[in-house]
């Protein structure tokens, strides 16, 4: 028996309505803020991620799906969405378009992680990037979009965690202070933190290990070390978020795991999901385009994890709109009626009424049972009598009532019903069948 690879999921029809709901709302958000869609390959040359994400990050050290292709090139399944968008921006000269350029994407992300609820080896992200401006209004726009997506979806009990990690200049001063502070702890409790002290001291601040957190709590805060420009940027951002009435919390321990961030970093977190509580996050990455070989262009972005959003919708018992978008089940008795059903289904679809047509020559009773189990509100039934009298029988599945109407009136009647809710026509000769 073959199984899906560990940590990777099939998305079965029963869950698709959640996906449609979340992706439709995300698309709507991107329209509301003027973000245009970009798609990049699932695979990139490995060097792109080594350079952008950083060679000493968890993603590069432990999580990338990297392999040599048949031509001998090292390629990597995309472990995050920002670097590929930046690569495309440079490769296609998008800096020649009016700046900033606002882009959004949906795509699979691959990370070799220890799978658990809300942590997969392949997950989907919706992300937005604004490239070509350092205006803090864009940082606020990112937080606003991520927050609005969650609230539009009806998610509750979320927080926005916000921090500034400064620029290269003020951060390196701060990192020095941090090293001095940590050097007074002869032996750090976790091996990861001992490594971080050497290679990536900022990440000491967000270690999830409780004894490490106790040390981190008393560490100096970066805010006191921010240079004037970074402080002004941060103050403006906070002011804009207050104007937008976004309830953010300042969190000096939020640093995020990728090397390219500077100044703003933020996360949308669920209050109760423990380790996997981040629904989305992002920040500013003013140096990345230049680092990848482009003309310098400041930028900011965020990405939301769609599986985590769905997990939270389900936890909060939020029901997306109806699962089956078809409205009508087309049932028939006999071979002539089957042919008539085919053209009738075509008429309904031309009128944008979704139809599921019966198959396999089952009894009418079995067909109506199927209509019920699919949750379709109406069945249209055609038999020999209907063919002769050029009529159809329309059945309200919930009430079990049915009526006969002229076939040529079906489309207009069904359309009218969406508005009024009733079924018009004379009584039918069919029994209820159930
Ligand atoms: P990141 O690129 O790590 O900032 O992740 C952005 C969002 O993607 C996170 O906030 C999560 O919602 C989601 N995410 C990240 N890693 C995973 C994973 N392994 N499994 C499922 N969702 C993830």
Image: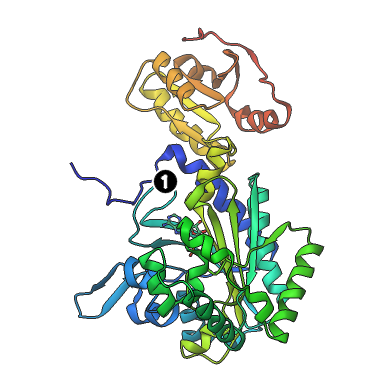
Which of these two is toward me, 97 or 232? Answer: 232
Which of these two is toward me, 426 or 419? Answer: 419
Which of these two is toward me, 359 or 91? Answer: 91
> On the image, which quarter does residue 419 sit in?
top right
**Residue 235 versus residue 347 in the image, above or below:** below
> On the image, which quarter does residue 242 sit in?
bottom right
Residue 170: x and y in percent read 62, 85
The structure residue drawn at horizontal position 42% and vertical position 13%, both measured from the top left corner, is 365
Of the 4 image quadrants, the one containing the N terminus is top left
Report the side of 238 relative to 283 (left or right): right
Residue 41 appears in the picture as rendered: no
> On the image, which quarter does residue 137 sit in?
bottom right
Residue 417: x and y in percent read 68, 28
The structure residue drawn at horizontal position 65% and vertical position 44%, both measured from the top left corner, is 156
Which of these two is toward me, 377 or 382? Answer: 377
Report the side of 330 relative to 194 (left or right): right
Residue 410: x and y in percent read 60, 28
**Residue 230 versus residue 42 in the image, above or below:** below
Q: As drawn, which residue projects farthest toward the right? A: 243
Q: How is the image coloured?
A: rainbow
Report the side of 277 relative to 412 (left or right): left
**Residue 181 versus residue 253 in the image, above or below:** below
**Residue 197 versus residue 145 in the image, above or below:** below
**Can you identify the residue that label 1 sits on?**
117
Under circle 1, the secondary element is loop
Residue 213: x and y in percent read 51, 60
């Amino acid at each position: 028996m073959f199984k899906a690879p560990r940590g990777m999921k099939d998305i079965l029809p029963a869950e698709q309505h959640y996906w449609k709901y979340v992706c439709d709302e995300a698309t709507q958000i991107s329209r509301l803020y003027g973000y245009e869609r970009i798609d990049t390959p699932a695979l990139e040359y490995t060097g792109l991620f080594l350079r952008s994400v950083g060679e000493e990050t968890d993603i590069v050290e432990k999580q990338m799906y990297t392999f040599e292709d048949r031509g001998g090139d090292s390629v990597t399944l995309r472990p995050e969405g920002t670097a590929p968008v930046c690569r495309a921006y440079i490769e296609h000269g998008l800096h020649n378009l009016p700046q900033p350029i606002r882009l959004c994407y949906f795509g699979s992300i691959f990370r070799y992680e220890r799978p658990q609820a809300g942590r997969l080896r392949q997950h989907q992200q919706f992300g937005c990037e604004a490239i070509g401006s350092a205006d803090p209004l864009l940082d606020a726009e990112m937080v606003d979009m991520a927050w609005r997506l969650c609230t539009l979806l009806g998610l509750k009990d979320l927080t926005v965690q916000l921090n500034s990690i400064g620029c290269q200049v003020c951060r390196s001063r701060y990192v020095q202070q941090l090293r001095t502070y940590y050097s007074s702890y002869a032996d750090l409790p976790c091996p990861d933190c001992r490594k971080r002290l050497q290679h990536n001291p900022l990440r000491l601040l967000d270690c999830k290990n409780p004894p490490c957190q106790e040390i981190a709590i008393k560490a100096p805060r970066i805010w006191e070390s921010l240079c004037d420009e970074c402080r002004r940027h941060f103050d403006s951002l906070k002011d804009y978020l207050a104007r937008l009435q976004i309830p953010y919390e300042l969190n000096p321990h939020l640093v995020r795991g990728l090397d390219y961030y500077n100044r703003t970093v933020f996360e949308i977190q669920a209050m109760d999901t423990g380790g996997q509580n981040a629904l989305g996050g992002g920040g500013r990455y003013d140096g990345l385009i230049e680092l990848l070989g482009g003309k310098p262009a400041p930028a900011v972005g965020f990405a939301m994890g769609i599986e985590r959003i769905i997990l939270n919708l389900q936890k909060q018992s939020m029901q997306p709109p109806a699962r089956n978008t078809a409205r009508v089940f087309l049932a028939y008795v006999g071979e002539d009626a089957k042919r008539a059903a085919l053209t009738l289904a075509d008429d309904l679809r031309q009128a944008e009424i979704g139809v599921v047509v019966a198959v396999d020559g089952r009894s009418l009773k079995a067909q109506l049972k199927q209509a019920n189990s699919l949750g379709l509100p109406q069945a249209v039934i055609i038999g020999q009598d209907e063919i002769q009298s050029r009529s159809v029988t329309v059945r309200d599945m919930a009430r079990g009532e049915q009526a006969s109407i002229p076939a040529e009136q079906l489309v207009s009647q069904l359309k009218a019903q969406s508005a009024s809710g009733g079924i018009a026509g004379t009584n039918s000769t069919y029994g209820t069948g159930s």
